[in-house]
Amino acid sequence: MNRILVAPSLLSADFGNLQRDVEAICNADCDLIHVDVMDGHFVPNMTIGSVVVEPISKIATRPLDIHLMVENNSFFVDLFAYLKPKYISFHIEEEKHPHRLIAKIRELGISPAIALNPHSRIEDIEYLLPDLDMVLLMSVNPGFGGQKFISNVLDKASRLKKIIVEKNLSTVIEVDGGVSNKNITDLANAGVDIVVSGSYIFKSQNIKNAIDSLKVIKN
């Protein structure tokens, strides 16, 4: 039986105690560690660069899942590639040459992924699906943690899963934004494989219980 994989988002961690929080989510059996990289241009916020992520990668006992919310994607791929994350996702809205960048990420030994903002259409990336290991569907507008879940992503995920199955692909679906125990069953039923959750996990009374509550069995 397959279950949802859980990727806590460090965007909601305590940046004054990153080692403590990274160790806490790893000890609580998370599956991935989601790292939001924002440049203040593509989104109205700035987060962390490779200098900060490098020590995180040394502490972490789970693979990194790097989500680029930036301009000049290729530059940032080069910046983080040496850390050997499991995934690097970039936004289709910002990339003029997605095929080239997907190939570059794969050549670096990293699984390539594309992220879609809430308003972006699945049809815009359908031709790229055979080359992708993951599609990240944003269920909030990117840039800040703690936002309300946009429920339209459920239909979007269902339609994407149908295309993946019809094409006999192994591409997985990740959803990021407003994920909690209140919508996890709906996400699982929509065919989502991985969920990113920040505030729900890091602001909970018990991180282990919060992560476990998201590890539901999917259809």
Image (cartoon, rainbow, N blue to C red):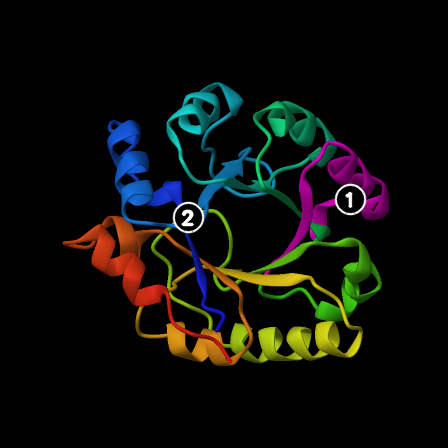
Instruction: Mark 1 or mark 2: name the one nearer the start of the chain.
Output: 1
Front residue of this view, candidates 117 and 183:
183
Are there few (<14), some (14-19), or many (20+) residues within 10 Å of tag 2? Answer: some
Stretch in magenta: 93-117
> Does the magenta portion include 167?
no
* Image-based side of 41 in relation to 168, left or right: left
Indicate the amino acid at tag 1. Answer: Ile
| Label 1 vs label 2, nearer the camera | 1
* Image-based side of 199 in relation to 88, left or right: left
At horizontal 24% and vertical 29% (from top left) the residue drawn is 17
Q: Which residue is mark 1?
A: 102
Indicate the amino acid at tag 2. Answer: Phe
Query: Above or below — where is 134 with respect to 12?
Result: below
* Image-based side of 158 in relation to 21, left or right: right
At horizontal 67% and vertical 36% (from top left) the residue drawn is 71
Residue 115 showing in the rendered view = yes
| Callout 2 secondary element | loop
Percent across and percent down for residue 116 are: 64, 58
Quarter of the image for residue 43 reads top right
Quarter of the image for residue 15 reads top left
Residue 96 showing in the rendered view = no
Percent across and percent down for residue 142 are: 51, 52
Front residue of this view, candidates 63 and 101:
63
Front residue of this view, candidates 181 and 94:
181
Query: Above or below — where is 133 with respect to 186?
Result: above
Q: Which residue is mark 2?
A: 144
> Does the magenta portion include 103?
yes
| Distance (Cα) linking label 1 and label 2 | 26 Å
